[in-house]
Amino acid sequence: MNGMLLLHYLEKDARRSVTDLADILGESEKDIQSQIRYLEDNKIIVGYHTVINWDRANNDHVDAIIEVSAKPERDSGYDKIAERIAKFPEVTDMYLMSGKSEFFVSVSGRTMREVSDFVGQKLAPIDGVQATVTCFVLKTYKRDGVLMEFEQEEDDRQLVTP
């Protein structure tokens, strides 16, 4: 069985049924279920999620992207600092990056004040954190490969004839 192909199908649509996956991949449902269980047990698949357009949900919701500059710790580098930051429930995504800041942290909250309080009271005081730059998301156009606001675009180019 091609496990990578299974991963690609699940990444695009985690709700795809085992029956559909078996048909697409030419495998038995039992083999697909077994492969998914293996991938989950070995932390290759670590979760399933739904992409939500919060702008249309009529719910208070704010996303922010925070650049975090940090000083590595002896023997653990950035891992211990990253673990402390990543454990906060407000943190939705976190990456060690190349560039001017060490970490890229996505945070969600109900209000800008809630996110600001998180940065000032929880994130910035962590030992090793040297600076933060917070950017509030004003509108989401695409998330996890899914377009949020755009309808099927028509081709508005002019026909050019020789």
Image (cartoon, rainbow, N blue to C red):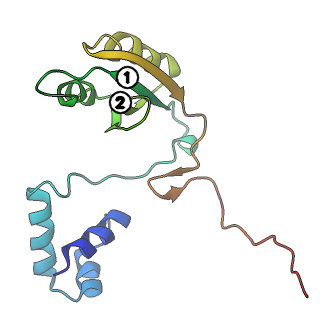
Q: Position of residue 94 (x, y in %)?
A: 33, 36
Residue assigned mark 1: 69
Label 2, on which residue? 102
Q: Residues within 10 Å of mark 1 (few under 14, many from 20)?
A: some
Q: Residue at x 49, y 16 (%)?
A: 113
Q: Nearer the viewer, residue 17 or 37?
A: 37
- Quadrant occupied by the C terminus: bottom right
Seen from the viewer's position, the closer of residues 71 and 156 is 71
Q: List x then y, in percent, for residue 31.
A: 11, 79
Give the residue type at disc 2.
Glu
Residue 68 at what x, y percent from top left? 38, 24
> In the rendered structure, which disc, 2 or 1, sits on the residue that comes first in sequence?
1
Q: Residues within 10 Å of mark 2 (few under 14, many from 20)?
A: some
Q: Residue furthest right?
A: 162
Residue 85 is left or right of residue 145, and the answer is left
In percent of width and height, residue 141 lies at 59, 49
How many marks the image carries: the answer is: 2
Q: Does residue 76 lie above or below 49 as drawn?
A: above
Identity of the residue drawn at 28% across and 54% down: 48
Rendered residue at 56%/38% (across/down)? 58
Callouts 2 and 1 close, C-beta under 8 Å: yes
Please state if 61 lies on the left or on the right of 28 as rendered: right
SS of the residue under disc 2: loop
Q: Secondary structure at mark 1?
A: strand
Amino acid on which disc 1 is placed: Ser
The N terminus: image quadrant: bottom left
Residue name at image x 86 percent, y 80 percent? 159
Depicted 129 relative to depicted 97: above or below: above
